[in-house]
Amino acid sequence: MHRVGGGLLEELLGVDLGHRGQRLDCGRGHQAEFISYRTKAVDSVLGEVAVRRAYYHCEQCEHGFCPRDRELGIEGSSLSPGMLRMVCRTGSDEPFGEARRDLKDLAGVELTIKRIERATEAAGESVRLGAEQESDGIVSGQILSALRAEAVPKLYITLDGTGVPTVPKENQGRRGKGPDGRAHTREVKLGCIFTQTQLDEQGNPVRDPDSSTYAFSLENAERFGALLYAEARTRGLERAAEVIVIGDGAPWIWNLAAEHFPGATQICDLYHSREHLNDLAKQVLAVGGIEDGRTWVTARHDELDRGAIDDLLLALLDTPAAKANAEVRKAVAYFDTNCERMRYGRFRAAAMFVGSGVVEAGCKSVVHRRLKQSGMRWTVRGAASVISLRCQQASGRWEAIWQWARTQTNAA
């Protein structure tokens, strides 16, 4: 069936050989001349097919091209558009070796591991560039983000960072957290935006189904902030009744929130706050001076969960550990700095989420599951390409991204 289909496809493609006259505009202001017909082998979902097409050459540019390649979406590629999508779907979903096996077993297509890797990363790079150009246009005002027909009741913007293992050359001169002081990973900043319109039977907030979309960057926080802001505008930022930013307390998160989302409710993730309190309680109890440690810790957690941060601070600062140890006082300052972001009782009363579990799950499903498997080491370009494909797929934009990819390939 593949052979029959491939033969029919070959005949169909041969109906138009792409001859567009003896001379043709080269795209750079010159005239390219028809030279001959040339055949190109293309791997399609029906197997390899031979595509015969007209070849033009421009003497001024010293550049040749085939108009039919651009029309068919195979310019600079030996994979058909349908085959490329299959390769990218498997290559961004699983290790390239496993993608090769699945393409062979499920589609009867045999490609080398290296070819799958190169095609996936090249397409991912094109998708990333297209998404970034669109984001830049939104931020600059050259592209007007689509406004929703209805206002968004609650728009959540959740942020987090996670590491991706990278090859040594990508880490030269970078300080890391390891014992040797060298970096072995690069940080991926990931943002997840979702909406909330309903409550469950107990009055708890419920994330709208299929409302999560993602933005990411392996660059600095400034670049990531612009990408996240553009994504938020696309999701209806201007028409949101309430905007809520949730993060783990890292300063860069609140700096971005203040710059791009002024007036938004800022919430420090409750579960990170509990972890900080647990670590701090261990230091306090290790010094001693508290009669019933278990009761004391339980009371502090109750204050945190209620958002009674003023009471929590007083209790922490009144301990012998805080009075004698500067490191303990520094740990206490975390709660002082994020005091207004920890009013969890107030946030719950307003039916808001108080945890960043959505973006943390995104870090695991979008980044970790594909890029942090045993023995993996990535270049920054390769990691960014694969994450770009995975973000778009997780955002429900798998169909839309191929227009970006084709536009970028043609421009290149």
Image (cartoon, grey):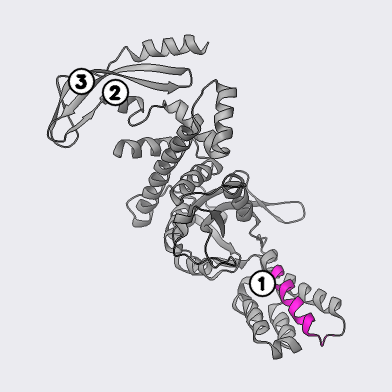
Q: Earlier in the sequence, mark 1 or mark 2?
A: 2
The residue pinned by badge 1 equals 343
Residue 353 versus residue 403 in the image, above or below: below
Residue drawn 37% across the image and 30% down it: 77
Q: Position of residue 326 (x, y in %)?
A: 65, 86
Q: Nearer the viewer, residue 145 or 126?
A: 126
Residue 361 colored in magenta in the image: no
Could you give the CA–CA distance between mark 1 and mark 2, rounded to whole angstroms?
62 Å
The quadrant the C terminus occupies is top left
Position of 61 with respect to 219 (left or right) is left
The residue pinned by badge 2 equals 68
Could you give the CA–CA distance between mark 3 and mark 1, rounded to whole angstroms?
68 Å
Could you give the CA–CA distance between mark 2 and mark 3, rounded to whole angstroms?
9 Å
Q: Position of residue 158 (x, y in %)?
A: 57, 58
Q: Position of residue 213 (x, y in %)?
A: 54, 48
Helix, strand or loop for the magenta stretch, by majority: helix
Residue 144: in sight, yes or no?
Answer: no
